[in-house]
Image (cartoon, rainbow, N blue to C red):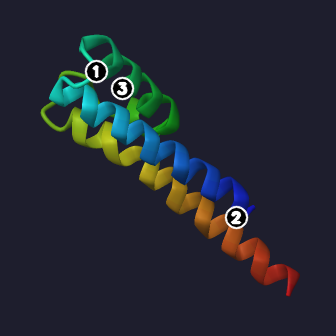
Amino acid sequence: MKWLFRLLTAAYIVTLGITVMGFLGYLGPVPEALGDGLLGLLGLPWNKLIDEDHVYAMTVRLLSPAVNMGILWLIADLLDSREE
């Protein structure tokens, strides 16, 4: 289960990098949309709880994958403790 956490962490870091490079204009306007789309997929269902026009929508979109990884880490930790 820890391997899944590591895989999602790597995907989150790469997606954040694409999003930041898109915002700074290094990759043009299209990769920005790509990074946002990937962040949206990694952050489901938490990013659907806030309206897209809300002031904090981008903050929620950036941090919602971290919430999912925290939940996955807790589940993995509980499963590892049951096996011992």
The x, y position of residue 77, in whole percent, is 67, 74
Dividing the image into 4 quarters, which one contains the N terminus?
bottom right
Frontmost of labels 2 and 1 is 1
Q: Mark number for residue 56?
A: none
Residue at 35% over, 19% down: 31
The x, y position of residue 45, in whole percent, is 50, 36
**Residue that label 3 marks:** 36
Please tell me whether residue 71 is drawn above or below residue 40 in the rendered image.
below
SS for dot 1? loop
**Residue that label 2 marks:** 2
**Residue that label 1 marks:** 27
**Amino acid type, mark 2:** Lys
Please tell me whether residue 42 is drawn above or below residue 6 in the rendered image.
above
Residue at 31% over, 32% down: 19
Dividing the image into 4 quarters, which one contains the C terminus?
bottom right
The x, y position of residue 80, in whole percent, is 77, 77
Could you tell me how far apart the alpha carbons at marks 3 and 2 are, in whole angstroms?
Answer: 26 Å
SS for dot 2? helix
Please count the marks in the image.
Answer: 3
Which is more toward the observer, 43 or 35?
Answer: 35
Q: Do the residues labelled 1 and 3 touch (CB within 8 Å)?
A: no
